[in-house]
Image (cartoon, rainbow, N blue to C red):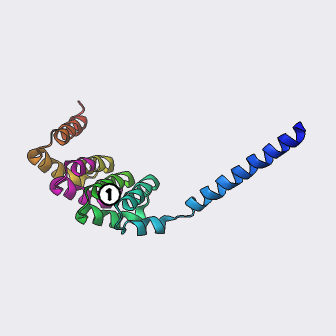
Amino acid sequence: MKKIMMLTLCIVFSLAIISDSSIAQDTVKKGTKEYIADLSSNDEAIVVAAEEWIADNKEKSALSRLQELLRSDNRVKVRLYAAIALGEIADESAADSLNNALLNDPSADVRYSALLGIARIGSKNSYDAIQKARESEQDPFIKDLIQKMEDKLKGK
């Protein structure tokens, strides 16, 4: 009786594991092209999830679309995650887009994320933008981060 009970439990447990792994495989099937296509969605949650996946995977093929979202999307959260993704990918070609966001985005959160991305990329093309931001920025957190970046460069 115990053997039958143990065998039954093993079979049920094995079926549960197989079922879970097939569900996991279904979610893994989504690839780079699908995530990049998701960047065009009207659903903010879908766009943000795609931006997070692209950032985690440092997917350079999405750079131009991320730059476009950062430059022109009217949703703050989408621009914020675009800046984060561009910083995570850390490609020199994204520096100008992040510089522009640092100087012109109406959201302090987006500007702060752009500054973090600029720091991660480390582009010499960003020096002038950081200096302009230091002079014009009103947000105390951004000003503090700029000061810390400058102190680090000076070796303090």
In the image, the segment drawn in magenta is 91-113
Examine the rendered structure and indicate whether residue 139 appears above or below residue 71.
above
Magenta portion: prevailing SS class: helix
Q: Quadrant of the N terminus?
A: top right
Q: Amino acid at mark 1?
A: Ala
Dot 1, crowdedness within 10 Å: few (<14), some or many (≥20)? many
What residue sits right under mark 1 in the picture?
82
| Location of residue 25 in the rendering, given as x and y in whole percent from the top left corner | 62, 59
Q: Is residue 36 left or right of residue 84?
A: right
Camera-side residue: 41 or 154?
A: 41
Please tell me whether residue 92 belongs to the stretch shown in magenta.
Answer: yes
| Location of residue 34 in the rendering, given as x and y in whole percent from the top left corner | 47, 68
Residue at image coords 13%, 44%: 134
**Which element carries disc 1, helix, strand or loop?**
helix
| Location of residue 120 in the rendering, given as x and y in whole percent from the top left corner | 33, 47
Return the residue found at the far top: 156
